[in-house]
Amino acid sequence: ETGVTQTPRHLVMGMTNKKSLKCEQHLGHNAMYWYKQSAKKPLELMFVYNFKEQTENNSVPSRFSPECPNSSHLFLHLHTLQPEDSALYLCASSRTGRLGTGELFFGEGSRLTVL
Amino acid sequence: AQKITQTQPGMFVQEKEAVTLDCTYDTSDQSYGLFWYKQPSSGEMIFLIYQGSYDEQNATEGRYSLNFQKARKSANLVISASQLGDSAMYFCAMRESYNFNKFYFGSGTKLNVKP
């Protein structure tokens, strides 16, 4: 167990559906991230939250809507997605600041298929 | 320009042999961190090893070592005594000092360990 839990692990949705991905970290970290991983592409950073404040939005389409109610929970709300949004969505957390290496701790990912 | 380049899409290694996975990076920052992650077929990204740009010694973690050549901007991962469980995707990543939350990932190398 990595300390970062993502649900659901698999999701199939139609283009008109609304669904949400959930991420929870039990590591006491202050930063949380959403990454998108498509086949044969580098990981794409989508959003970063630091102490619940969004610090990065990497030009993500508005059909993806993040929510970070506290430092331990992160959501990705999905609506009117396109088939090209099918991918593995990875949540990660880290401790920012100058102590330690600040590496990312990842969840196991949510495999999304958009029909 | 790409920040992280991994030129080997796929590699094969015989069990119990050593293997080197290549990674080059591009930055003008003097202070940065380099990371390697392993991603098995389950999807989770597992942190392996870290090298700071000011670290004089190459990082080692068990069977993993990082061959850091600062002048050449390379940070190759060496896995000694390969095991079947090492078969996975491996990603190199970099974080620059001015943005502690932004990690740049390479496109990955798929390692297959043959029995």
Image (spheres, coloured by chain):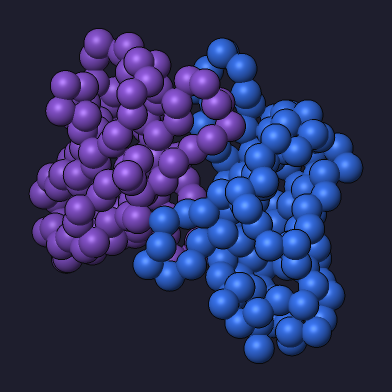
Chain colours: A blue, B purple
Residue at the image point whose x is 65% and y is 57% from the top: A60
B71 left or right of B56 in image: left
Residue A8 visible? The answer is yes
Q: In the image, A106: left or right of B72? A: right
Q: Is residue A3 above or below residue B13?
A: above
Residue A52 percent across, percent down from the top left: 81, 34
Q: Position of residue A115 (x, y in %)?
A: 66, 88
- Against B71, is B55 above or below? above
Depth check: give the residue in front, A71 or B17.
Answer: A71
Identity of the residue drawn at 61% across and 73% down: A85
Name the residue at 44% across, 41% down: B104
Tell me if A59 is positioned left or right of B81 in this view. Answer: right
Position of residue B78 measured from the top left corner of the image (x, y, whole percent): 20, 39
Q: Quadrant of residue B88?
A: bottom left
Please state, as top left, top right, bottom left or bottom right, where the C terminus of chain B lies in the image. Answer: bottom left
- Name the spot of residue B23 as percent of width and height, x first: 24, 42
Front one among B40 and A69: A69
Where on the picture, by quarter, is residue A18? bottom right
